Amino acid sequence: MADKRGKNSDGKKNTEKEETIEMVRFGGRGSRKTEFRRPTGVAVSQASEIFIADCSNERIMVCDTRGKVVRMFNTAVKGIFKAKLFKPHDVTVDKDGNLWVVGTIIVNEKKLLYDNLLVQFSTEGRFLTKLDLPLTGVTSGVAVRPCIFPPDPPAPKATSSSKKKSSTSEEKEEKVAVYPANPLEIVFTDQRSRMVERKGYSESCVNVITPDGEPVKVVGPRNTRKPTGVAVNQKGDLYVTDSWLHCVHVFMEGREVTKKYKKFGRFGSGDGQLDSPHGICLDLKGNVIVVDRGNWRVSVFDSEGKFVRHIMTDMPDLCAVAAGPNFLVVTCVGHCGTDTATIIPYSQ
């Protein structure tokens, strides 16, 4: 811990300085090293590395806080004969520093048949594992969280008392419930839709699964219409943007909450109102940062959904957002060749 004189508790000078962040925009439509084609997802690691899902280029771009590309790797999964590329829609970083990428892959080029999948990579781009997801709609957002409620414990484990007892008395045993370690859970949005009597019918939802692909729960089919982005707080609550209902859904997972669902935001252009929200993330204080795509702005709400302020108010084609310790990264995906990423200084 540093004191007022710039020394730590050992009396040594504190040489570590927080990096000064300046606003910088980079990218542009194309396939070169410094360009993007539909950067639809973004994540920031604990080391402040920026990972951008470059969807149509089928790759992950890794940038520093000045917008410089430090490395990139193709989003490829192992096949029978060769690796096969897929289009990444969103990316997130888990507690171990690995990446989880959700996207679509072509399974039949002639018939243009696609499958959804969830793939884990190392931060250096090494393929780790793949999960096939049901092709019910577009999986556009992904996040990770620790398991909140552990599974039912196994049969109580008996431990003998350390004290010696007489042979005539019954030996008493202390029963200890042993819970397995909390696993990691992956959360992704699913924009399901089907036609019923020539009318669109939505079954959109948010899926929670384990890294092995085991389903944990499905939330939101009665509430969501077109879920896009998803973020998770430290309690495990899910914040989900809905671009059709112009709001943020909150699915609460805490042990002592009485109301499991709420939402905030409504259609409009005033403070606290939203128009086609897409990307979403949380800062270190739990504030909710929302990409208000239709209003060309990035807005901040507190954890209860109360409007705080706008970060940007004149940025068209916004898509995704991620938060670092003192900066935000937003991506823009437009029909006129926007396809950029912008690093913005941010004070929490």
Image (spheres, rainbow, N blue to C red):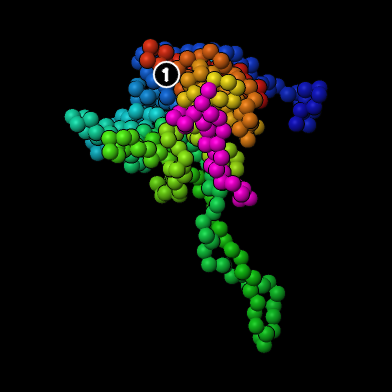
Taking the image as shown, residue 314 lies to the left or right of residue 101, namely right
Q: Position of residue 266 (x, y in %)?
A: 53, 29
What residue sits right under mark 1 in the picture?
333
In the picture, the quarter occupied by the N terminus is: top right
The rendered magenta stretch, by its main secondary structure, is classed as loop
- Picture quadrant where residue 95 is located: top right
| Residue sitting at x 54%, y 20% | 269
Residue drawn 38% across the image and 40% down it: 203
Q: Quadrant of residue 130?
A: top left
Q: Which amino acid type corresponds to the residue marked 1 in the rendered image?
A: Val
Residue 248 percent location from the top left of the image:
53, 33
Whether residue 289 is situated above or below residue 150 in the rendered picture: above
Q: Is residue 214 above or below residue 204?
A: below
Task: Based on the picture, tell me whether residue 80 belongs to the magenta stretch.
Answer: no
Which residue is outermost to the bottom? Answer: 168
Is-magenta flag for residue 243? yes
Q: Is residue 132 visible?
A: no
Q: Residue at x 69, y 78 (%)?
A: 164
In the shown orientation, is residue 107 left or right of residue 45? Answer: left
Which quarter of the rendered picture does the C terminus lie within? top right
Q: Residue 206: x percent and y percent?
A: 44, 40
- Give how far across and how far down residue 289 sits, in percent: 57, 27
Q: Residue at x 51, y 14 (%)?
A: 315
Q: Secondary structure at mark 1?
A: loop
- Say if residue 17 shows up in the picture: yes
Residue 5 sits in which quadrant? top right
Q: Is residue 180 left or right of residue 2?
A: left
Q: Which residues are magenta?
A: 242-268
